[in-house]
Image (spheres, grey):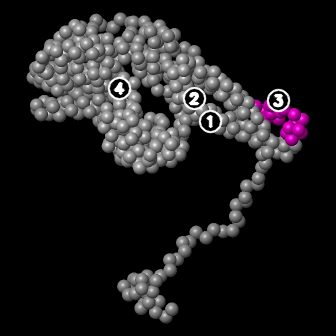
Amino acid sequence: IIDEVDSILIDEARTPLIISAPDTESSKYYQEFAKIIPHLRAEEDYQIDEKLKAVTLTERGIDKVEKILGLENIYEEKGMKYLHYLEQALRGQTLFKRDKDYVVKNGEVIIVDEFTGRLMPGRRWSGGLHQAIEAKEGVRINPESIVLASITFQNYFRMYRKLAGMTGTAATSAEEFDKVYKLEVVIIPTNKPVIRQDLPDRIYKTMAGKFKAVVEEIKIRHQKGQPILVGTTSIEKNEFLSKLLQREGIPHQVLNAKYHEKEGEIIAQAGRLGRVTIATNMAGRGVDIILGGNPPDPVEAEKVRQLGGLHVIGTERHEARRIDNQLRGRAGRQGDPGSSQFFLSLEDDLMRIFASDKVKALMNTLKIPEDQPIEAKLISGAIEAAQAKIEGFNFDLRKHVLEYDDVMNKHREVIYKKRREFLQVENWELAIGNWLKNDEEKIALQNKVKELGDKFNQVAKLVALRILDMFWLEHLENMEYLRDSVRLRAYGQRDPLVEYKSEGHRLFRDLLKKIEETIVKTILQVSLKEAPAPSSQPINLTKAKKKIGRNDPCPCGSGKKYKKCCGRDL
């Protein structure tokens, strides 16, 4: 049973679960390229596709990098490995923003969860991206990692025979729950009727106009004494709004991933009279704000109810409507009064990247002041359409990840089953005997069993497990390379997924054959060596005395030189 089931099974499901171990020491090239990228200019030297979160160098950009590095042709002279560092440095510099995608804390780059706004210590971006961001921020670059095992959230949770969960915002993703997990969404009525007022969105031409209006709205409601919760999409915007409120002299509390230690205390008092709380998505999901504060004060709670309860202000629409609904849902809980309203601008990421050009053209035609709200059905409809478009786009992304992982899942099941069998084998002579090809190998095996005696089973198990693990890690890497290479086959009118399945099947067949052959070969060649016996000689633990120089101070403490004191007669 999963709490906040949409957060786990849908929002988290874009990135697979990975168990990794440190691999090679990180290259000095990360630092080298972190210094080069700031010299490149957007549009001129590289182009960003914000929809796909991708960045590509232009011909001019490649020429500029070659000039800085003193190379004639980076592709010929340095090869793919060098280009990998360049691409990751470019991604880290242009697509990932400090205090939005990550924070730097105690000399470490820590990822911020885009859905919950919380820090995710211990998690790292793969493929050298994390190292590129560490180089960009000038902190210690940790070693790159090697993937030991990987599985998508979808395939992990589908391993449970029974699966269920609860959330207040599953209805908009009912299709995905059904298609991926075969789960039906059932809406349960609330304990008490919801009397919260969801006010229409206020849309402004510019971001500056929007924030000006947000501050004005907070000021009016704060003067009445109504508690206000303001939701922002990033730490950066959270702190920007805080500065604007400080300028206006409005007392407020700031809640984001940097101050998560104070979260309980801030949330407990967010429902008090006149309290203003600015929070990232941290205050959106699973947070219960009690009117009048906590511990509850019935008199203060009643005053807050008369003022209209908690008022929630959203400063930007999220990619998923569910996240917006989670923020709205902080007000009007358990039949209490409350209200919510979103303040948007045409410069918000959602509108800028996904809204239709028709809306942008209309806004340029209308000579509307930046601080005057626009209430047009066309624009409200465009926002809804943009969100639905992104939800569909993200669903396709998750589906795409799952389709490829379904291929790996079959391989994973076979290998893990084989590993369990290896752990349970009691007669390894019999097990290996089934893999032998000729009489010579059979005789060699009998000799090896005699040579190793009662240690044969133990040695064989250790060898078999080591070889299985080693080849599986290699296979994971090969499948990752294959996945990258089959994409290009789409240009030849071939379906990359079909190609991945057939090539992957061939690789896996070869892998199983190779595992058995290598186990046989290794066991027939293995031999036991006696461990060196521990030395029986006593170890002298006294420190070697440091030789005293003739001109050094005398160790007797007289203050004279050694040659004129205790060392005089030597």
Counting from the top left corner in percent of width and height, residue 224 is at: 10, 20
Which residue carries the number 1 mark?
Answer: 474
Q: Is residue 16 left or right of residue 36?
A: right
Tell me how far mark 4 sits from mark 2, CA to CA: 26 Å
Counting from the top left corner in percent of width and height, residue 544 is at: 55, 74
Q: Nearer the viewer, residue 112 or 499?
A: 499
Which residue carries the number 4 mark?
Answer: 50
Q: Amino acid at mark 2?
A: Leu
Which residue carries the number 3 mark?
Answer: 434
Tell me if residue 462 comes above or below residue 505 in the rendering. below
Residue 238 falls in which quadrant of the image?
top left
Q: Is residue 443 magenta?
A: yes
Q: Amino acid at mark 1?
A: Glu
Q: Earlier in the sequence, mark 1 or mark 3?
A: 3
Tell me how far mark 3 sits from mark 4, CA to CA: 56 Å
C-beta proximity under 8 Å, tags 3 and 4: no
C-beta proximity under 8 Å, tags 4 and 2: no
Q: Is residue 212 left or right of residue 125?
A: left
Q: Amino acid at mark 3?
A: Asn
Which residue carries the number 2 mark?
Answer: 482
Local crowd at mark 3 within 10 Å, few (<14), some, or many (≥20)? few
Tell me how far mark 1 sits from mark 2, CA to CA: 12 Å
Q: Main secondary structure of the magenta part?
A: helix
Counting from the top left corner in percent of width and height, residue 244 is at: 15, 31
Which span is picked out in magenta? 425-446
Q: Earlier in the sequence, mark 4 or mark 1?
A: 4
Q: Identify the residue at image location x=61%, y=70%.
A: 540
Counting from the top left corner in percent of width and height, residue 152 is at: 52, 24
Whether residue 219 is visible:
yes
Provide the secondary structure element on which disc 2 rests.
Answer: helix
